[in-house]
Amino acid sequence: MLPDQPTLRPPVTDLRSDTVTKPTRAMREAMAQAEVGDDVYGEDPTVNALEAKVAAMFGKEAGLFVPSGSMGNQTAIQTLVPPAHELLCDADAHVVTYEIGAAAAIGGVSSRTWPAVGGGIDPGQVAAMVRQDGYHAVPTRAIAVEQTHNRAGGAVIPLSTLQALRAVADENGLGLHCDGARIWHAHVATGVPLRTYGELFDTMSVCLSKGLGAPVGSVLVSTAARVAQGRVIRKRLGGGMRQAGILAAAGSYALDQHIDRLADDHARARRLAEALAPFGVVDAAAVQTNIVLLDLTKSTVDGATLAGKARERGVLVSVLGPRLGRLITHLDVDDAGIDQAIDVLTAILRG
Ligand SMILES: Cc1ncc(COP(=O)(O)O)c(C=O)c1O
């Protein structure tokens, strides 16, 4: 059970995550007007249109609407890695940190990690980890990366690194998966086209309910054959939804209206980081997208104290570790919210 929290009085600036956004009035309007059908029968026109739209954005053959990013990742992993085979990823990757052991528990997939160093990847190190087929060891079948990298503070993995990983995957007959919960942010921050990312990966799970502001949903994109396989896996996971067009309409609206504005979230994250940098808790130059990590190892204030005191003054902060905090900017935080957060957090850090 969650601990009791005092009721907050507005204004509240919620920087815990970009998943906390509420659908805008215009998005709700689009949801209300959505044509719907039974998507398990493949008859929901709005879902079908969303799947085709996202697939086209990444230059992929097909898409599959799933309720969550976790289901998108796990469905993709199951299409790439058979039971008793192995997935390689970063030790801080969402798939091994926050998906409750799903790859092993549901897919029978063994995961092995390379050390997390701020989202940095050494393709040579990954290549050296690959285990070939044989009766003695667990054979590697796929590599997963996260773009942008959540626990690495929204870091963008450079295109050249992804290309080198693609080469490692090709040389070893492996699949390459992208947890693209925030691929939109990487695209906006770097200008790399979504299709360029699409060309590199066998499977991608992209989220509509993070920075884009939809209430629910992610889309898995891949080849038509793999998506057909994914459709069966989604059903097995209980992710076959019925009149899901109401949700797909929100996602489609978000894709049309909320990608370009991510630049505002990035600018606000930078402004926050620059204001907090003098306290030695943020490397402002490292902030590339909408996530600001607070390294409190040298501060007199620990994560729980910071979050508790900030909450009393209407600013919500995530605590990722005893001395690690996280702030995420999003659609529901405007310039006034950033001003409020800067006032409150600087006052606490000043002591
Ligand atoms: C990088 C990353 N991948 C996947 C997910 C999972 O998304 P969901 O919460 O929709 O399962 C998240 C959630 O915040 C995330 O940050």
Image (cartoon, rainbow, N blue to C red):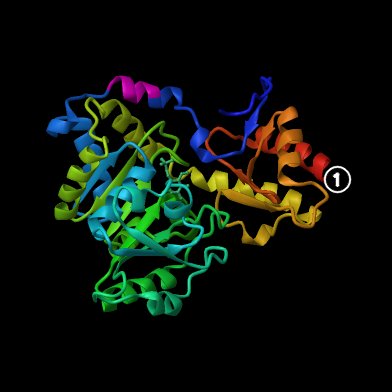
Location of residue 270 with respect to 88 vertically, above or below: above
Q: Can the viewer see residue 313 in this picture?
A: no
Q: Say above or below: 278 vs 139.
A: above
Give the camera-side residue of 202 and 187: 202
The CB of the residue at mark 1 lies under 8 Å from ligand 1: no
Asked whether, in this view, residue 151 is left or right of residue 134, the answer is: right
Say whether residue 151 is magenta.
no
Residue 207 place in picture, x, y as percent: 39, 44
Residue annotated with mark 1: 350
Query: Within the image, what quadrant is residue 147 found in?
Result: bottom left
Q: Quadrant of ligand 1?
A: top left
Q: Report the front residue among 286 and 104.
A: 104
User: Looking at the image, which residue is at 46% across and 26% down?
Assistant: 24
Q: Position of residue 281 (x, y in %)?
A: 74, 54
Give the residues in magenta.
28-33
The picture quadrant where one finds residue 265 is top right
Give the residue drawn at x 35%, y 75%.
130
Q: Which quadrant of the view contains residue 143?
A: bottom left
Task: Report whether residue 79 is seen.
Answer: yes
Q: Name the residue type under label 1.
A: Arg
How packed is label 1: few (under 14 Cα within 10 Å), some, or many (20 or more)?
Answer: few
Q: Nearer the viewer, residue 80 or 271?
A: 80
Q: Residue at x 74, y 28 (%)?
A: 312
Q: Farthest residue to the front: give it.
A: 136
What secondary structure is the magenta-colored segment mainly?
helix
309 left or right of 240?
Answer: right
Where's residue 196, x and y in %?
Answer: 33, 63
Image position, residue 174 (x, y; %): 27, 69
From the viewer's perspective, tell me whether residue 178 is left or right of residue 292.
Answer: left
